[in-house]
Image: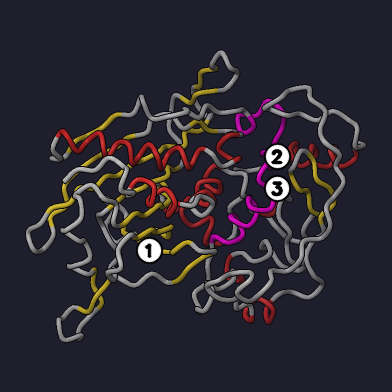
Amino acid sequence: MRVSPKAALLGAALLATNAGAQTYDPMNPGAAPPASTAPAALAQPKTGAAYDPYGTWENTTISDTNPTGGATKLLSVIDGTPFYEKADHGGSDSTDQRMLPVWRGGDLPVDAGPKSPFLPGTKHPFRYHYLIDFWKKWPDAKVRAEPGSPDVLPGYVPPDLSYMRIDNGGVPAEAVPVLRRQAEAVYAALIRIPMMQRAQGFSLNGAYLRVFPVRTESGGVVYAWRLRIPFNTFGGKRTQRPDGRWVANGGGPAALEIRTNARTPERPPPGVYHGTQVVYVQQMNVTLVTELGAMVTSSDRPLTASEYRNGGGDTIANPDFLDLGRPKTDIQFMAVIPGPDNPSVRSGPHQGSESPDGVYGRIVASIFLVDWKAVVDQVNSPGAPRAK
């Protein structure tokens, strides 16, 4: 999402406004904002088990290469949205919005791009950290744009997936309702987070579910599904509902994809981020393209194995990962990944140029803001509907 010069002037005007002045709230037009007293400076991440039971942040690369002079300061908070000093440089969505601190003398937000922190206990930089961290600190943030812009319009988020279209790729009819209930539980967890409840600039209409069997190398079968939730933006035709929210009649830059029991990784997961396993998964129908996402497994079997039984060769997806002794509908593997429509959209978060209030920035952050393991444990519990 690009910011026009008018939007930049709007941000300056907001700063000049006293704490009691009216500001535009797309969810409650005309309402007075809360006091804009800036919170105390946020402390640096703590280290040790009390902060992250999986290890500590290894920030040596960041501290060794950060430009001198520190980061831009937080000036104010308006309606739950931070406003930082203007960076010396910039020119990307992530810096022009002034919603993120930027290193002085640099052109990237703090802890973004090549300066991303490593996954605990590894030397693997986690490039999504700055987007997730923003929404953890500012869960009620609003899009910073001109009043009336399509980017600030409140979007419709369906309360359930009763309207959803389902494509059955060969699963027995009695198993389809079970798989559907699993997808609905995942969706319910997603829309509970504040950024979805206060959707701006997009609507979630058009979810699609495909259910299909997965045959293992030993000839056994389990059932899988793929749920695609489009984030449709308001740049084109849109319709306003009686409740004031908008529904996009066109598409958007990306979707959120959740898949189970299929396309397990062919290389070991790189690490864990705040208790959530990180994984690279090959995109459906896209050759040699992998996406970084969140992963849940409900099996003690390794995801990957050596190519040969004696331990030699390359690392491959474990052919014995799926346990055929469990109900066929059990979720033994689930991946949650962003589904961009083109490579240019995909590159933004990795480069540190994606704004957190943009649609794709929200998609990426949401992947690591939901306790997916709790959802999987719920739908796999003994009392949950199953299919043998």
Q: Position of residue 178 (x, y in %)?
A: 26, 38
Q: Position of residue 360 (x, y in %)?
A: 52, 46
Q: Measuring 29% from the left and 52% from the top, which residue is drawn there?
A: 331
Badges 1 and 3: C-beta atoms under 8 Å apart?
Answer: no
**Of labels 1 and 3, the one closer to you:** 1
Colour scheme employed for the rendering of this structure: secondary structure
Q: Which residue is mark 3?
A: 97
Q: Position of residue 231 (x, y in %)?
A: 47, 37
Q: Which residue is mark 2?
A: 144
The amino acid at mark 2 is Arg
Q: Measuring 57% from the left and 22% from the top, which residue is drawn there?
A: 245
Is tag 2's residue or tag 1's residue first in the polypeptide sequence? 2
Badges 3 and 2: C-beta atoms under 8 Å apart?
Answer: yes
Q: Quick check: 115 left or right of 219? A: right
**Disc 3/disc 2 C-alpha distance (Å):** 7 Å
Q: Element type at marker 2? A: loop
Report if residue 270 lies within the magenta region: no
First to last magenta residue range: 128-152
**Disc 2/disc 1 C-alpha distance (Å):** 32 Å
The amino acid at mark 1 is Tyr
Q: Residues within 10 Å of mark 3 (few under 14, many from 20)?
A: many
Is tag 3's residue or tag 2's residue first in the polypeptide sequence? 3
- Dividing the picture into quarters, in which one does residue 322 lie? bottom left
Q: Is residue 212 above or below residue 289?
A: above
